[in-house]
Amino acid sequence: MQVIGSLVKKSLDWGIMKFKINQIIAVKDKTYVLSKSLTPSANFRLSETCSLGGFDIENWFDIPKASDENNIQRNSIVAFVLKNDRDAESISVNDILDLLDRFVRVVESFYTVSGEIYAVLSCGTGILEIGTRLVSVKEKKWIIVKNGFIIGRQKDEKLQRQVADNLWFQYKLQPIDHNEKPAIGETLRVIAPLT
């Protein structure tokens, strides 16, 4: 990690988890998508609401045991299981797909002295992009205007470990039509940025 003033910034090998499709295999009643991680040094955690390229996947993955051309066990190939077997028709070998979760959990949120809103969000599939919208159960909305950093107040050891594991990230949020911060423990729906 680099320390920049009161900001801590990780190297650029983290972010949205991307996978390149190597093979699609149907075995019995399951369709497996074998893919190579394009961010192999970053960790991820699946949930029941994850998708690969917008296609729902099960809360399960495997790292097939195999060796590369130098007889070293590879760990960048991951097998995901599609929830809907028909989705395989829309996926092709060499496609590059994002691993995303439809929800994040608020670990901490606070106002700065100047009134800006910051939140630490638990997102097991990598950092959320600037422009991503977050929606609460009460339909309160925020947009991410800055991502992937820790300001000086956040020196908690658990937070530092989760950030290093690519699971928790801090964001600057801009509320939409209100001035509230998201509640700690709240689950927020993730809406991808407009393109």
Image: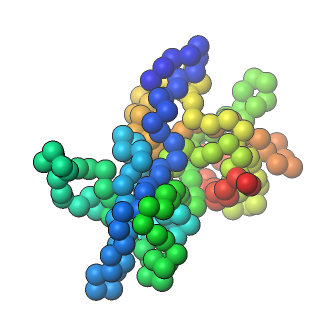
Residue lying at the far top in this picture: please name it. Answer: 5
Q: Residue at x 46, y 44 (%)?
A: 167
Residue in front for this viewpoint, 1 or 168 = 1
**Can residue 66 be seen in the rendering of this structure?**
yes
Q: Residue at x 50, y 59 (%)?
A: 97
Residue 48 place in picture, x, y as percent = 46, 67
Residue lying at the far right in this picture: please name it. Answer: 177
Q: Residue at x 79, y 45 (%)?
A: 175
Residue lying at the far left in this picture: please name it. Answer: 71
Quarter of the image with the C terminus is bottom right
Residue 131 place in picture, x, y as percent = 71, 46
Which quadrant of the structure image shows residue 54?
bottom right
Residue in front for this viewpoint, 58 or 79 = 79
Residue 136 place in picture, x, y as percent = 69, 57
Residue in front for this viewpoint, 193 or 162 = 193
Q: Residue at x 53, y 63 (%)?
A: 53
170 up-or-down from 28: above or below: above
**In this rendering, would 4 be left or right of 39?**
right
169 up-or-down from 86: above or below: above
Residue 49 place in picture, x, y as percent = 51, 66
Residue lying at the far bottom in this picture: please name it. Answer: 28
What is the number of callouts on the image? 0
Quarter of the image with the N terminus is top left
3 up-or-down from 141: above or below: above
Residue in front for this viewpoint, 38 or 187 = 38
- State how the image is colored: rainbow
